[in-house]
């Protein structure tokens, strides 16, 4: 990655045409979040890397993200829309903890390239929707500084009883659907939580078919500013489709559900916990 320009192909001499800008990336998001237990707990082991430790009956994380980001180089007032669906398992590796996000589907090709090449995430393209849209009409991506009250809101604040839904479709096949109905807002002191942390198996083969990158990577936001967090009731469905294993992760029990509104993240780099880079 070239300082001041970014990374990814095309790798021109000027660097202006590279796929994405340098870290850190600024993001603001609203998120539909469900925690659940698997109908078949053994599926967690079948989906995770053998070197990652996972509980026999883990609480799985399902997320729909509705994000606006600057791709590392957008001008003030400019941003890229991104929606993402993700499934992750809580794992441990060498004393570190995080979510092994084994499935990530995103609508933005710039983010997909950045996620796969830079962050080591398994991001692939998909049609993702989060409804209804609740834009406030304000631009709040021009700087990290989070203003007070409504000045810092990209999405309008919800109310108890509001319902939101997320849907994932890939190549015309419906794969995942989530609904959350809001019940009560989490008190501000309880809402100041640590940010998400991810542990990923990064595997990139070369043209000969041998692996040149085979690593366990930890990534996390460099800065987090929570907006409002709402407790909710949630529903989650998966659907069988050709070439998909998501339906094997069907829920047995919904443990908890939340809606995050105006969460701000700054994404930086990560660190290699184990593996090779030849």
Image (cartoon, grey):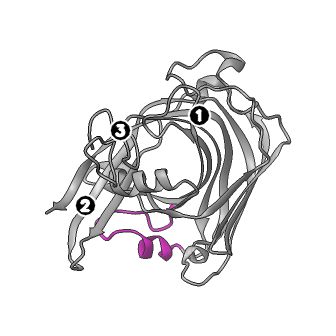
Q: Position of residue 174 (x, y in %)?
A: 69, 72
Of circles 3 and 2, which is in front? 3
Q: Residues within 10 Å of mark 1 (few under 14, many from 20)?
A: many
Quarter holding the N terminus? top left
**Of pointers 3 and 2, the one earlier in the residue sequence:** 3
Quarter holding the C terminus? bottom left
Identify which residue is drawn at 49% across, 23% down.
144
Question: Is there CB contact under 8 Å for labels 1 and 3?
Answer: no
User: Left or right: where does residue 240 sit relative to residue 119?
Assistant: right
Q: Which element carries disc 3, helix, strand or loop?
A: loop
Read off the magenta span: 41-58
Q: Which element carries disc 1, helix, strand or loop?
A: strand
- According to the picture, the residue beneath numbered tag 3 turns out to be 22
Residue sitting nearer the eye, 66 or 247: 66
Q: Position of residue 156 (x, y in %)?
A: 76, 31
Report, in whole angstroms, how far the alpha carbon at label 2 lies from the one at label 1. 29 Å
Verify whether residue 57 appears in magenta. Answer: yes
Q: Main secondary structure of the magenta part?
A: loop
- According to the picture, the residue beneath numbered tag 1 turns out to be 263
- According to the picture, the residue beneath numbered tag 2 turns out to be 215
Identify which residue is drawn at 79% across, 35% down.
158
Q: Is residue 80 above or below residue 93?
A: above
Q: Is residue 156 above or below residue 63?
A: above
């Amino acid at each position: 990655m070239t300082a001041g320009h970014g990374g990814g192909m095309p790798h021109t001499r000027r660097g202006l045409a590279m796929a994405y800008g340098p870290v850190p990336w600024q993001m603001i998001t609203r998120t539909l979040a469900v925690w659940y237990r698997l109908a078949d707990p053994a599926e967690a082991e079948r989906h995770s890397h053998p070197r990652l430790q996972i509980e026999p009956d883990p609480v799985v994380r399902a997320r729909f993200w509705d994000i606006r980001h600057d791709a590392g180089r957008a001008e003030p007032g400019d941003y890229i829309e991104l929606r993402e669906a993700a499934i992750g398992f809580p794992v441990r590796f060498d004393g570190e903890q995080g979510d092994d996000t084994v499935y990530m589907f995103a609508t933005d090709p710039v983010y997909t390239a950045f996620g796969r090449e830079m962050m080591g995430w398994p991001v692939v393209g998909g049609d993702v929707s989060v409804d209804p849209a609740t834009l406030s009409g304000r631009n709040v991506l021009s700087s990290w500084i989070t203003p007070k009250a409504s000045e810092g809101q990209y999405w309008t604040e919800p109310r108890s009883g509001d319902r939101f839904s997320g849907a994932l479709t890939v190549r015309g096949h419906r794969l995942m659907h989530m609904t959350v109905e809001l019940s009560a807002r989490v008190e501000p002191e309880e809402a100041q939580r640590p940010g998400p942390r991810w542990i990923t198996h990064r595997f990139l083969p070369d043209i000969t078919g041998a692996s040149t990158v085979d690593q366990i990577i930890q990534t996390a936001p460099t800065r987090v500013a929570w907006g409002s967090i709402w407790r909710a009731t949630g529903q989650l469905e998966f659907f069988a489709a050709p070439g998909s294993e998501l339906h094997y992760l069907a829920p047995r029990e919904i443990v908890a559900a939340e809606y995050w509104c105006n969460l701000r993240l700054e994404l930086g780099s990560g660190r290699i916990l184990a593996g090779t880079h030849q």
